[in-house]
Image (cartoon, grey):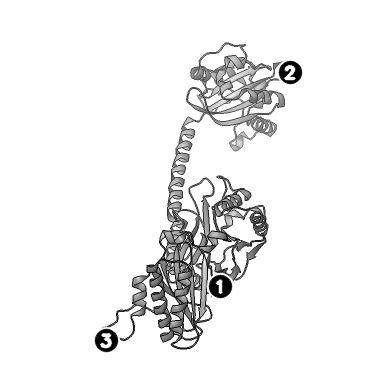
Amino acid sequence: MNFTRWSARLPGTQRRAAARTEQAASPDRRGEGSVPAARAESLTDGDRPLPAVDELEVREVLDRVPCLVALVHGPDHRIAYLNDAYTAAFGPRPVGAPARGALPELDELGLLPLLDQVLRSGKPRTVKSRKAPDGRSYTFTCTPAGEGDGRGVLVFATDVTDHAEAAERLRASERRQRETAVTLQRSLLPQELEEPDDLRVAATYHPGGTEAAVGGDWYDVITLGGGRTALVIGDVMGRGVRAAAVMGQLRTAVRAYARLDLPPHEVLQLLDGLAMEIDANQIATCVYAIHDPNEGRLVYASAGHLPILVRDENGTVRRADEPTGPPLGTGGWMHASGTVPLGPGSTAVLYTDGLVERRDEDLDEGIASLERALAGATGGPQVVCDRLVRSAGVTPEHDDDVAVLVLQHPARSGPEGELFRNAALELLGGVEAAPRARAFASGVLTSWRFPAELHDLGVLATSELVANSLQHGTPPMRLRLRRTDRRLIIEVTDGDDHLPRRRRAEPGDESGRGIAIVATIASAWGSRRTPGGGKAVWCEFLLPKTAGVGV
């Protein structure tokens, strides 16, 4: 076999041949310490001359290399040569036999089509880390060899088992780390969403990519009492366990601040300072919104987050663009609250940037695509949530985390609509407003067919809240009764922003027992400041199951 005839096509051979030619054509520089290649030369006295490459026996070289070498010829890839390493790995094979039958290991590895391709194109091909039937992993390089009728393919296989096993161990470790990170991320998210009386909600979270560094996306639904609901979604910049830990702290803080029943911009103001204390190098975007069914709107504030999308009952989608402040953790910014309508029949979507941001697309185009998808997405909140994720092309290989929160304010009618009722009374005049309020509450609760015990408790709570407002508040004053399918809510508003507190009245005190009585008989009570000054004091009673039907 002529080594120089087919070895010229081995990878790197052309470069070495060119180097030898260039060196042979250059003047002799032995005086400068160079040693001409491919020449027998005595380097020191007594040393035996080294043989040139062209003088080596190719069969002896190939038989001694530890790599697997096979030479096949013709369209049937008939075996011309197998070196000792190949024979030791797969056993002897008859010379002249077609590879399809005589070399089943190549067929099993899917290399026979590659041999055809190399023979046709005359270009070498390489496949990396294929596991052979002997249990070892090899990287195969197939190189065209020979010319004319004697054309063939030289198969050169390097054992990479150790590298392949190390890579598999690394991948397994990364999978375990990712599973740990995703488990941590999911454990920090709400396991079950709270279910408000007036809203239907659904949410989804998709971790991005395949590496362990999950992100810090989060969402939450918080019932505030008095029929109001807080909704929040946020995204901690960066990835990994640190981002997830910061996310968990922010989510816990949001729930704590929400219990104070503060306006959305004040909640973000508190979160901004907390984010700087947690980690000055981490920033987060967040939108915090409050839904009040009596007002038919969302009051929200945004810290660098993407706009809320709302589809009304007619199918028209609008963005809640303003106001938007910088992300949490930047400091020095006064956030502001805005509003967006959310009446019966409306659907709102809160989401993180992984749903709409693409490397090859402008962010506004991604939001516009989401608007179009929302306009055509009908059904319940979970159905809408799933459709939006599918329309955005989110797959398990998606490179960013995605969190989506969908809420709907259903348009109720018929028997279901009868379970959601409102009644209000302006409290005009002086002390005579109290008996008027009691009579009003008694008539409303009777018309709603509440049981006698609940009727009496509702009238008593109304009397105490109105008396408290008349004594400590200022006009305008208003009484509002609301029922849902689960609870009765009684709320009194006035123009004074001093919030009441529960205290223990001394035996000789003539006042101070009203809030204590309300707290004792009601399922829950609370107070909050209202926009523009003033306050609202409320209490609620859970309805017996028999009171939620047939009204």
Residue located beneath label 2 in the image: 148
Gap in Å between the C-alphas at discs 2 and 3? Answer: 118 Å
- Give the secondary structure at mark 2: helix
In the picture, measured across the screen, residue 367 lies left or right of residue 300, that is right
Position in image of residue 323 (x %, y %): 60, 71
- Give SS at disc 3: loop
Alpha-carbon distance for marks 1 and 3?
A: 45 Å
**Whether residue 550 is situated above or below residue 276 in the rendered picture:** above
Q: Nearer the viewer, residue 374 or 402?
A: 374
Mark 2 vs mark 1, CA separation in Å: 81 Å
Q: Residues within 10 Å of mark 1 (few under 14, many from 20)?
A: some
Q: Nearer the viewer, residue 452 or 48?
A: 452
Counting from the top left corner in percent of width and height, residue 487 is at 44, 65
Query: Can you identify the residue that label 1 sits on?
Result: 337
Which of the numbered marks, if any, corresponds to residue 508?
3
Identity, as a three-letter code, of the amino acid under mark 2: Gly
Q: Is residue 104 visible?
A: yes
Q: Are marks 2 and 3 in contact (CB under 8 Å)?
A: no
Q: Nearer the viewer, residue 365 or 128?
A: 365
**Could you say where residue 52 lies in the image, as x and y percent from the top left?**
60, 23
Residue 273 visible in the shown view: no
Query: What's under tag 3, amino acid-wise?
Result: Gly
Q: Amino acid at mark 1?
A: Ser
- Looking at the rendered image, the quarter that the N terminus falls into is top right
Q: Position of residue 402 (x, y in %)?
A: 55, 53
Mark closest to the chain's N terminus, 1 or 3: 1
- As helix, strand or loop, the secondary structure at mark 1 comes to loop
